[in-house]
Image (cartoon, helix red, strand yellow):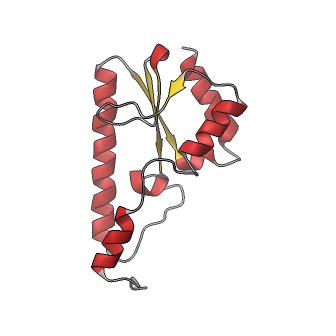
C-alpha cells in the first residue's frame, strides 16, 4: 500500500515522534519500578548516549529500546514501502546502540538494554528479575 501522505507531510509527522515519555516503554518501566520497589534510578541523565535511566550507585545505564526502531525481530514487522530506507535506518540505529554500549562499558559502567516487547505483561516479571539481578551484583 502506498503512503497516503506526500514526502513532506510524512517527514513532518515523523519529526513529531518523540523519544521521551513513551507510554509503552519508559513510563511503563517507571510504574514497574514503583510496583517492585526498585529505587536509586534517575532519568534525563545528560551524557552522550542518553540512557533512559541511570543507577548512579551501581554505575549502570539502562536503555529501553523500541523493537521496530532498534532492530529486534520479535514481531518481524518490516515496511514494504521504502524497505531499503527502513533497513538502513535500523542498521544505523543498531550500530549506534553498539557504540554507545561500548562507550559506557569502557568507562566502567554496566549497560542493560530492555526490548519494548520484554515489557509486555507476559515478560515483565522475567525482565524485572533480570534487572534486579544486575542491580544486586
Q: What's the residue at 38%, 70% (across, down)?
A: 13
Q: Name the foreground residue: 11 vs 109.
A: 11
Q: Please give left or right for residue 68 compared with residue 40 in the image.
A: left
The answer to whether residue 31 is above or below residue 13 is: above
Residue 64: percent from left, percent from top:
49, 41
Residue sitting at x 43%, y 67% = 78
Nearer to us in this view, 107 or 8: 8
**Residue 10 image point, x, y percent:** 35, 75
* Foreground pick, 43 / 120: 43
Query: Horizontal placement of 101 versus 119: left or right?
Result: left
Q: Quadrant of residue 130?
A: top right
| Residue at point 51%, 48% (across, down) | 21
Give the position of the C terminus as an image quadrant. Answer: top right
Measuring from the top left, give residue 34's x and y in whole percent.
68, 31
Residue appearing at x 30%, y 19% in the figure: 107
Image coordinates for residue 1, horizontal then vertical, percent: 43, 85
Q: Is residue 43 above or below residue 23?
A: above
Image height check: is 46 above or below 4?
above
Count the marks: how many? 0
Residue 93 shown left or right of residue 132 in the figure = left
Amino acid at each position: 500500500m502506498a503512503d497516503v501522505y506526500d514526502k513532506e507531510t510524512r517527514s513532518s509527522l515523523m519529526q513529531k515522534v518523540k523519544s521521551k515519555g513513551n507510554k509503552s516503554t519508559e513510563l511503563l518501566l517507571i510504574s514497574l519500578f514503583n510496583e517492585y520497589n526498585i529505587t536509586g534510578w534517575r532519568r534525563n541523565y545528560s551524557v552522550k548516549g542518553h540512557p533512559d535511566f541511570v543507577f548512579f550507585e551501581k554505575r549502570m545505564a539502562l536503555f529501553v529500546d523500541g523493537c521496530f526502531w532498534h532492530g529486534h525481530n520479535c514481531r518481524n514487522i518490516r515496511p514494504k514501502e521504502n524497505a531499503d530506507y527502513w533497513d538502513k535506518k535500523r542498521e544505523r540505529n543498531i550500530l549506534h546502540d553498539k557504540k554507545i554500549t561500548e562507550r559506557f562499558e569502557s568507562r566502567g559502567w554496566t549497560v542493560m538494554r530492555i526490548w519494548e516487547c520484554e515489557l509486555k505483561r507476559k515478560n515483565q516479571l522475567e525482565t524485572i528479575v533480570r534487572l534486579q539481578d544486575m542491580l544486586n551484583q
